[in-house]
Image (cartoon, coloured by chain):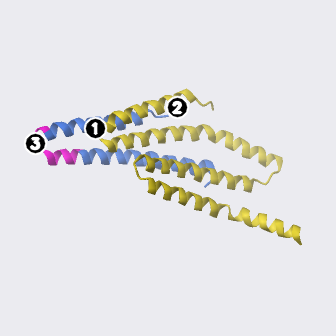
Chain colours: A yellow, B blue
Amino acid sequence: MKMEIFKVLAICLITAALAVVLKQQKGEYALLTALAGGTVVVLYILKSVAAPIEYISARLDGLGVKTEYFAVSLKALGIGYVTGFIADVCRDSGQASLAAKAELAGKCAIFILSLPLITAVLETALRFLK
Amino acid sequence: MDVDFIFKIAAIGIIVTVLNLVLVRSGREDQALLTTLAGLVVVLLMIVNAIADLFTTVKSIFGL
């Protein structure tokens, strides 16, 4: 699936213009318009990036690499994207502290997700020491 | 890619602003407030659906 970068950029520009027009009259609609535009763009990006991710994980599977570690990093990537999206929306609406909390939650989620990897590394190091 | 979605929300915002202006000018402040509230609820319902769609897509792609 080809990705039309200029289309995405045009949508971002048009959404920004609409948000500026609405901001003078009603601030809440400017925020909601920006949120809708961001959702549409991110959905489009995810749909075009799904096939390459599947391809890479299929290739890794074929090469005999352990895909569980790749799956963990993929999950961390997903959590990071979603958290960043929501934190940006919070920051746009003027709630910087809420954005910081969202980012903290994302960091904690990724840490919990990567705990098995940390223990695996520690176990390997201990096995070398013995 | 449904660009119509963005235009729809911006259009609702403009229409609600105009209605609000007309109702305030004709001295019906309470109805103006209700119009603003109704528009906000409609737009929020639309956006909540879109965000739910986004989250399910992220979940299915990244295997969360």
Residue A35 picture location, percent across and down: 43, 43
Q: Which residue is mark 3?
A: B27
Q: Residue sitting at 49 percent across and 59 percent down?
A: A101
Please indicate whether residue A90 sits to the left or right of residue A2 in the image.
left
Kindly give the residue lying farthest to the bottom in the view shown. Answer: A130
Q: Which mark is residue A8?
A: 2
Badge 3 element: loop
Q: What separation in Å lies between label 2 and label 3 (alpha carbons)?
A: 44 Å
Q: Is residue B62 visible?
A: yes
Please indicate whether residue B21 sits to the left or right of residue A44 in the image.
left
Q: Amino acid at mark 3?
A: Gly
State which region is magenta.
B25-35
Residue A5 picture location, percent across and down: 57, 29
Tag 2 and tag 3 share a subunit: no
Q: Which mark is residue A25?
A: 1
Q: Residues within 10 Å of mark 1 (few under 14, many from 20)?
A: some
Q: Residue sitting at 59 percent across and 58 percent down?
A: A107
Chain under callout 1: A
Looking at the image, residue A6 lies above or below residue A99? above
Chain under callout 3: B
Q: Is residue B12 visible?
A: no
